Amino acid sequence: MDNRPIGVFDSGVGGLSAVRRLEKLLPGEDIVYFGDTGRMPYGTRSRETIIGYSKEIIAFLLEKDVKMLVAACGTISSNLPDSVVKALPVPYTGVMLPAAQVAAATTSNGRIGLIGTTATVRSGLFGKAIRSIRPETKLFGKACPLLVPMVEEGLLEEDNEIVRLTLEMYLSSIKKENVDTLILGCTHFSLLYNQVDRVMESKVTLVDAAGAAAQYVQSFLTERDMLGDSSRKGKTRFFVSSEPEAFCETAQKFLGRSISADLRVQVLGK
Ligand code: DGL
């Protein structure tokens, strides 16, 4: 048994999609969440910058004595090099490999769509991960950077016209490719799950990368006997690098409860 918290991080509110799922799957676990709201979006930045920011957040979470690190961010997952992951003192998962496994197991026709940030699609690593499991698959990626600030702004209503039109614009090329599976490869997009499903006319299976990662964490901790005492109720603590009020407002809409977040600007730069 291990009562230490799980450390979950993202550039902003996107990783809450993993938190929501983890709280459901593992209600006895404590979670420490960090959203780098002061430096989001990550998806339009260079790989070096993404790695540098991620290392700072990881150091912060390790100080909180986490037992596992979860990069609830497609951008970080597909840009953090193995050398950094291998040097970590606690187990790590991103959202990319769990999502790739689910997508490879889901597709029937071998044609998979991916929506993510520019940095995620540019990395090409989702396709590599899926083809390492099912070599005959084809991945059709589309970067959708405008969706990230929309989600941060809390535009989560299912009937929001701006979001619908933006999704129509981004998804039109993927629709033409006859995919049967679509990966929501940016955790911000998990907050728009129903809206994406509607624009895809419920014709494809959506793979929510954040949900796949949460399931992976559950199996990983269970298999290694690293879960906390399940008789108690877990607590989630939130930290952000800027504007805690705005973060809490969007978080409240998505998590369905009010939360408070502590400001930790010292994570920003050195
Ligand atoms: N939530 C992130 C992801 O999964 C990053 C979005 C961003 O900061 O651009 O890719």
Image (spheres, grey):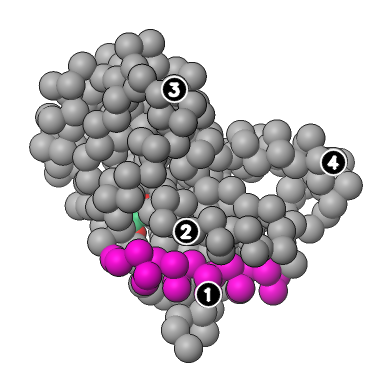
Please report whichever mark, 2 or 4, sits nearer to the chain's N-terminal start: 2
Residue wearing tag 1: 56
* Residue 101 in sight: yes
Mark 3 against mark 4, which lies toward the viewer? 3
Between label 2 and label 4, give the one nearer the viewer.
2
1 vs 3, front mark? 3
Neighbour class for label 1 at 10 Å: few (<14), some, many (≥20)? some
The residue singled out by tag 2 in the image is 80
State the CA–CA distance, disc 3 to disc 4: 31 Å
Q: Which residues are magenta?
A: 45-64
Identify the mark nearer the N-term, 4 or 1: 1
Few, some or many residues within 10 Å of mark 2 (<14, 14–19, 20+): some
The first of marks 2 and 3 along the sequence is 2
Q: Main secondary structure of the magenta part?
A: helix
Question: Which is in the foreground here, disc 2 or disc 3?
Answer: 3
Q: Which residue is mark 3?
A: 134
Question: Do tag 3 and tag 4 residues touch (Cβ < 8 Å)?
Answer: no
Relative to 155, does residue 80 appear above or below in the rendering? below
In what element is the residue under mark 2? loop
Looking at the picture, which amino acid does disc 3 mark?
A: Arg
